[in-house]
Amino acid sequence: MSKLGKQLDDKGLLILANHCPLLCDLSLSYCTFITDVGLRYLASSSKLSSLRLNFTPRITGCGILSLVVGCKNLSSLHLIRCLNVSSVEWLEYLGKLGRLEDLSIKNCRAIGEGDLIKLGPGWQKLTRLQFEVDANYRYMKVYDRLSVDRWQKQHVPCENMLELSLVNCIISPGRGLACVLRKCKNLQKIHLDMCVGVRDFDIICLSQRSSNLKSVSLRVPSDFSLPSLVNNPLRLTDESLKALAQNCSKLESVRISFSDGEFPSSSSFTLSGILCLIQRCPVRQLALDHVYSFNDVGMEALCSLEYLESLELVRCQEISDEGLQLVSQFPRLCILRLSKCLGISDDGLKPLVGSLKLDFLAIEDCPQISERGVQRAAKSVSFRQDLSWMY
């Protein structure tokens, strides 16, 4: 903030460029005085390989283009809330240069899913892609038919992609990011958060190609957060989970969650589908958020998971003390996190008290669990009680 003194500005970047010839990694956060002129100064930093811009509102696509033209060794670029970056010639240039390995674009309002096709041959080198659309503001770019056809006809080489994270994206069947999902061959980590349009077919293709997948995180809309999805084929079901179970034998981390809503989801992932996945894979970390289908039966099934080390349950309201008491029977569990669960109380933790089974226990905002009830339930305990979420 201005009242805290003079901020780093374009002249400051000129000093860096002139006096730090070995500069290779730069992060600029909330630097509102920096403009395209400053980025042009940085273009002379030939060693720069990693750049992160977080809320630099005066920078445009022209400034980024001038920087990437000069910094030909740039392999990592993160743009977060760069609101005035609309042109994407810089993305096309990076694609032709073929050095970019890590690309993150989050909440840059004027950059849409369709713009990613500009990366062209650069997809071949990319190992990590994070793309997040501002859920509260979507700049609806008009893409002509030629742009749409490019996604369908152009070869998108994703063989080296190891990590893919998509948040609030619209995924159109047969084109755009759906093409990326189907062409990843060596993916190890995928995170899909509120991505409308993802189909079972996309996940099935992904699981068949990326058999080395180790981490899956799926956050899907609940039935009432997006009413248009009810009985809509463009949604994920147990078929996706079964495909992952069948094809991804190295899966170690699973996170499944539904969006906030007053009503539970009733027709997406069922208890049967979830158990099919976690029982057939060597899952070490399991997190369930807003999964109302997971109940005491599910907790009983976890007793047979020989690899499970960490369990996180958030707003899983069908779990009772009877189910929680089964935690003492989990073979290798050492970390347990419980948050906003209404059906459990101090009684559910009693088998753990004094057992020293757990290395770490975290209780957050569970109204029936007291600070006294968690004492000696694990080697290390974290307790927080804020019930404002209930009202």
Image (spheres, rainbow, N blue to C red):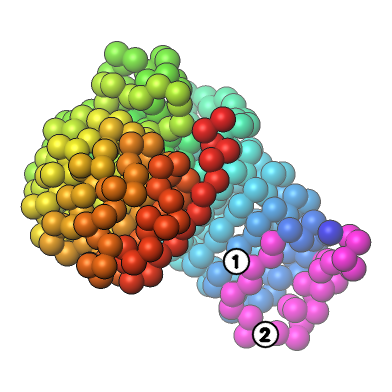
**Residue beneath the point at 19% across and 38% down:** 296
Asked whether residue 200 appears in the rendered view, the answer is: no
Question: Which picture quadrant has residue 42?
Answer: bottom right
Magenta segment? 2-29
Q: CA distance from mark 1 to mark 2?
A: 15 Å
Q: Is residue 318 left or right of residue 262?
A: left
Find residue 72 and name its label.
Answer: none
Q: Bin the neighbour count of mark 1 within 10 Å (Cα to Cα): few under 14, some 14-19, many 20 and up.
A: some
Q: Which residue is mark 2?
A: 21
Amino acid type of disc 1?
Leu
- Secondary structure under the numbered disc 2 in the rendered image: loop
Is residue 304 visible to the viewer in this orientation of the structure?
A: yes
Identify the residue at horizontal 52%, vertical 33% (top origin). Answer: 390
| Mark number, residue 51 | 1
Measured from the top left, where is residue 36 in percent x and y?
77, 57
Q: Is residue 250 left or right of residue 183?
A: left
